Structures are given as C-alpha cells and as structure tokens.
Amino acid sequence: MTIPSPDNLYPLPDMPRTVLLKPLVKNPQIEVGEYTYYDDPSHATEFEHRNVLYNFGPEKLVIGRYCALAEGVRFIMSGGNHRTDGVSTYPFTIFGGAWAEKTLDIALGAPSRGDTVVGNDVWIGYQALIMPGVRVGNGAIIAAGSVVVSDVPAYGVVGGNPARLLKKRYDDAEIELLERVAWWDWPVEKVTEHVRVIMAGTPAELAELAG
C-alpha cells in the first residue's frame, strides 16, 4: 500500500496547481505541518511571497497538519499594522533619513498581535483573508471570501466580513472528544489504516480507534 509522501512538493501527478507547503516554504517565520496543501492554478509555488503579506516582524505564521487552503487565501501579518494611538497613522519611519531618526523608537514600540496560528485539519476557502494574530482552532472551516479578524473556535464554521461564527460542526462534548483524539498526530500509517473513518465516521467511532 502506497502512502503519499509529505515531502513531495507536487502530490498530484500532472497537477502543478496543488502543492504541499511544508516542502515548499523556506522562510523560518512560516511553519507548516505535513500534508497541508495550497491550490492555485497560476501561483502555487509563490505562496510565501504572495499569500503571507507584511511579514516584516518577529511574528510567525504557524499552520498545522492536513489543512486545505484554497486559491487566494492570504495572511496579513503584524508588520502591516500602523500605529493608531497618535494623530497620524502614516508610517514615517520606514522611509528612513531624518524621519527614521526621529521616530524609530515610536515604530519599535508598536504593539504586536502575536503569531497567527492555524490548527490542524482546517479548511480555508477561496480568497479568505486572515488578519494578524488570529488563532484558528482544529477542524474549523472558513468560508470563501471571509475576512477573519478574531479567533475561530475548534470545529467552528465562520463566514462573512467580518467573519462570524455560523455554526459548530459538532456539539461541545464531541469537540472535546475530537481534540483529545487528535488524529492528526497519529503516525501516517495509522491515519492510512483508518482513513475511511477519519473522512466519514463519527467522533465516537474515531475515538474507538484512538487507543
């Protein structure tokens, strides 16, 4: 039985529009788990430059395993923030010279929203936009075109601009069970053995296999 390799940049033969991100991304500020893929018919291999924007600061983008990212998904990083506590939001410092000399301490003191973290088994739809510092829980779904400005709970479904919680995929007890099972942490051989239940089973059925 052949198991797909997590190191294969192009997991689908003759379909260069789909890439696994772990073997693609080289920027140490972007961490991606195994089998997470990005689909784009024109710019799939340019993900870390076209889809992770304003990545100038120390903040990281962390994406878990087995996530599905549709074309045009973008992450705005904290480097794109402008200070809003003064009269002007204009970023004088970045243009250097006397402006930088006079304002560097102000720019360096700008508050950070921290890392942007996407859990495991997350589906992010076409042209969704994730804002700085957002945390997306395991098993969540983000609808196409959403602008996500706040955290998304595990197994939540969000949509809109700004994105709001539309529903939860399971009740709280089932979500807690799935978080404990954490199938995405299983060895890939075990995932392969039970892939039908992972795709189409219930939380209870999956939990029975977790031992």
Image (cartoon, grey):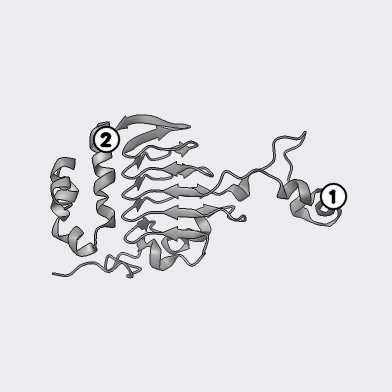
* Mark 1 and mark 2 residues within 8 Å of each other at the beta carbon: no
Q: Is residue 110 left or right of residue 8?
A: right
User: Is disc 1 placed on a helix, strand or loop?
Assistant: helix
Given the image, on which type of amino acid does mark 1 rest? Lys
**Disc 2 packing (10 Å; few <14; some 14–19; many ≥20):** some
Q: Residue at the right extreme?
A: 98
**Disc 1 packing (10 Å; few <14; some 14–19; many ≥20):** few
Can residue 128 be seen in the rendering of this structure? no
Relative to 153, does residue 184 appear above or below in the rendering? Answer: below
Q: Residue at x 73, y 48 (%)?
A: 107
Given the image, on which type of amino acid does mark 2 rest? Arg
Q: Is residue 123 left or right of residue 204?
A: right
Residue 102: mark: 1
**Considering the image in quadrants, where does the N terminus appear?**
bottom left
Q: In x, y percent, where is residue 165? A: 38, 30
User: Is disc 2 placed on a helix, strand or loop?
Assistant: loop
Q: Residue at x 40, y 51 (%)?
A: 71
Q: Residue at the front extreme?
A: 211
Q: In x, y percent, where is residue 113? A: 57, 43
Image quadrant where residue 203 sits: top left
Q: In x, y percent, where is residue 150? A: 48, 36
Q: Residue at x 50, y 37 (%)?
A: 149
Q: In x, y percent, where is residue 109? A: 71, 46
Q: Is residue 81 left or right of residue 109?
A: left
Q: Residue at x 33, y 70 (%)?
A: 7
Q: Kindly identify which residue carries mark 2.
A: 169
Image quadrant where residue 146 sits: top left
